Each structure stands twice: as C-alpha cells, then as structure tokens.
Image (cartoon, helix red, strand yellow):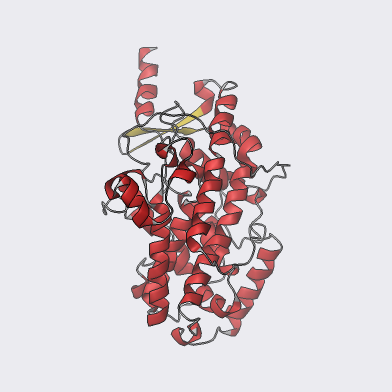
Amino acid sequence: MKKALLPLALALLVPVISPGWGFFGHRTITQVAVYALPSGMQNFYFRHMAQLVKLSTAPDERRSDDPTEESKHFIDMDHFGDNPFGLMPKAYDKAVAKYTADTLKKYGTVPWTVLDVKEKLTDAFKEGDTTAIIALSADLDHYVADAFVPLHTTENYDGQLTKQQGIHSLWESKLPELFIAQYKLDSEKADYLKDPQAAIWQVLQASYGFLGATFDIEAEINKKFSTEKKYTYSHKYGKTRRSYSDDFAKEYNKKVGGMVAYRLKGAPTMVASFWYTAWKDAGSPDLNKLMHPSKLSKDEKEQLDTQLKAWKENQLVDQSLLLALQKPEAAPTNPADIPDENAPKAPAAPAADQPAKVKVKQKQDDGPKQKTKVKKDDAKKPDDAFGD
C-alpha cells in the first residue's frame, strides 16, 4: 500500500498546467481572426496565416528565457480589492501612481501590454515593415486572447489556493482539445475600436465575471469523483505529472463548456478588431504592396474562398480545415526566415486523434458570477506543459 501511495505523492507535486489558451486554443483563435478581417487586410494576413498561427504561441515559448515576459499574460484583479474594476485606474501612468510599477508587474500587466503592442503594430504598418507586422500581430493576438481566459484575472490562477490544482489547463486546454467539434467558430467580423483601452478592460471584466462558476462547478463535480477517477498520470523526464481525467473533463464540460466556447468564439473577433484598428490608425496602408507577388494566386483565392465559406457555416472542423488539428510541420518561427511568396498550404487531413463530433446541448451564461474568495500566494504562474 505504501508503494502505491508514492507515485500519487509525487504526482501531486507536479500538476499539468499551461498558460493562456494552450497552443491549440491560441492557434485556433489566430486562424479564425484572419477570416474576421476586412478585405483590405485579409489577403495579406491570409498569405501569412501559417506563420501567424505558428507564431501565436511565441510569447509562451519565450517565458522561460525572458524575465520580462511573465507578467504580460495576466492581471490578478482580485488582489486590488472587492471592487477592483472600480478602483483600478485604466491608464497605465495613473495605475502606476496609485499602485507603483513594481506592484503592477507582480500582479500582471496584460491590458497595458495589449495597448503597447497595438501601438508598435501601428508603427510597423506606417513603416511598411512586413517582418515586424507579422511578429507584432502574432504577439498582439496572443495577449488579447489571454485576456479572454477567466483564470488570467485571479491570484488563484490554477486553483492552487482552493485545492483545485490543474483547473487552468482543464479549462483552457483540455476542454477545447476534446470538444472543439461542438464549438461555434463562426465569429463576428472585426470592428474599428474607437477606445482600445476601454475594449480590453471590458474583455477582462467579462472574464473576471466567470470566475465563480469556474471554481464552483469544479468543486461540485469533484464530489462525484474519487481521486483515482478524477486524475490521470503521466511520466516524463523523471517526473510524474497529474492532470484531470477525460471522464472528469466530460462532466465539467456539461456545466462549463458553453462558457469556454463563448470565450473562445469572442476572442478572434477582438483580435481581428485590434489588428484592424492598428492598421486604420496607421492610415490604412496598401498591404498588397508588401506582398510578393502582390496579388493572391488563383489557388490562394480558391483556398481563401473555401475557408471563408466553411468559417461562415461553422464547418472548419467538419471539413478538416482547422490548422490546430493538424500535425505541425518543421518550419522557422522567425518571420524574417520565411519568404513573402510562401502562401498558406491547403489544410491537410487532421491528425488521427481528432476528437469526434458530439452533439450536446449547452447553456451559455455570460453574466457575472460570485467569485471565489482566495488568499494571496507567491507561487509562480503556470509554465507551459502543452508544447508541440
């Protein structure tokens, strides 16, 4: 009996967790965002869609090497009181004056990171710098998408303060990977953001409103599962890792799946809107001049038309057109290493482990919930465990 307990004890030390939407979610959001763009931008972004999809996870990949990267992905709003959105100044300089730059860095800067990268992208459009446009678009895409994850707005980011370790990757990685066939990916078209600052704060406040359900539903379902059935264990690099089982994920999805799908559907529209706003603020430069050749080929046009039709009809998964479901090809991640004329390839058949489509009626609830009260913890934000 003691021997049987040892692997369990080790596993509890290394839960499987990941940042943001996980690689799968970020890549899905990026692809759909391209379809949500207006015609003046779409050809350029479609030409570079494969690059953008691959680069969409770059901010997570550099977290272990860049000490300034960590705080850019979240903001722990519950640290700032019971009415944090009323107390927190939305402008960075005013927030610094009230809380200090060190405090903001410690508890996250994602809204201001979004605005900073948006301004850099605007400058790249003005300069006609293709490499910078692609890299900054991917970064902006990533940070905006992160703001749609409720667990990026709390100190209890992985349930570590409420004995719900692993809930981060359950919500933003496992559920999308298992149930993407149930999601509606026909997002709305991009809009010009008259007030980008207000837009990103509205995203965060909506995410914060889902925290109560995120934790409470897990606790409710937990009562039905023994530890052996709740978790699954894997062994890699001498470590035992723990994650929620598929059976638990299925039960959790019945209650919270509509929320996850709702947030994932909204993210591409906001990403595309930030891209569009940066482009408009740069004077709407002709992006065709940055393409070589400057027009889409007949084959590219056919691919784009096919994918746009599938997107509008919510058929990207059914028609095997979702790039995130395909095995990634070995390719450089630096935009400078990829020539402009490389058009996106026609999506191939999905990986063999593509989840089957299951029809489930789901109730969506976008109203704010009572959030779980937690205490401060000095634990580090989750590191990625879902790399390629």
When asked about the image quadrant of residue 337, the answer is bottom left
> In the image, is 314 to the left or to the right of 78?
right
In percent of width and height, residue 85 lies at: 48, 45
- In the image, 193: left or right of 312? left
Residue 321 at x, y percent in the picture: 60, 63
Residue 345 versus residue 373 in the image, above or below: below
Q: Which residue is drawn at 47% across and 72% down?
A: 278
> Hey, which quadrant is residue 381 in on the image?
top left
Task: For residue 139, say whether it is visible.
Answer: no
Residue 116: % across, % down: 38, 63
Quadrant assignment for the N terminus:
top left
* Residue under the image location 70 percent in, 42 percent down: 362
Q: Residue at x 46, y 84 (%)?
A: 291
Task: Please indicate whether residue 265 sits to the left or right of residue 243 in the image.
Answer: right
| Residue found at the far top of this picture | 1
Residue at (50%, 69%) from the top-left corner?
275
Q: Which image quadrant for residue 300?
A: bottom right
**Residue 158: image location, x then y, percent:** 43, 36
Nearest the eye: 70 or 386: 70
Nearest the camera: 18 or 323? 18
Residue 20, can we see it? Answer: yes
Instruction: Please name whichever residue, 30 or 319, is drawn nearer the observer in this view of the structure.
Output: 30
Left or right position of 68 against 56: left
Number of numbered discs visible in the structure rendering = 0
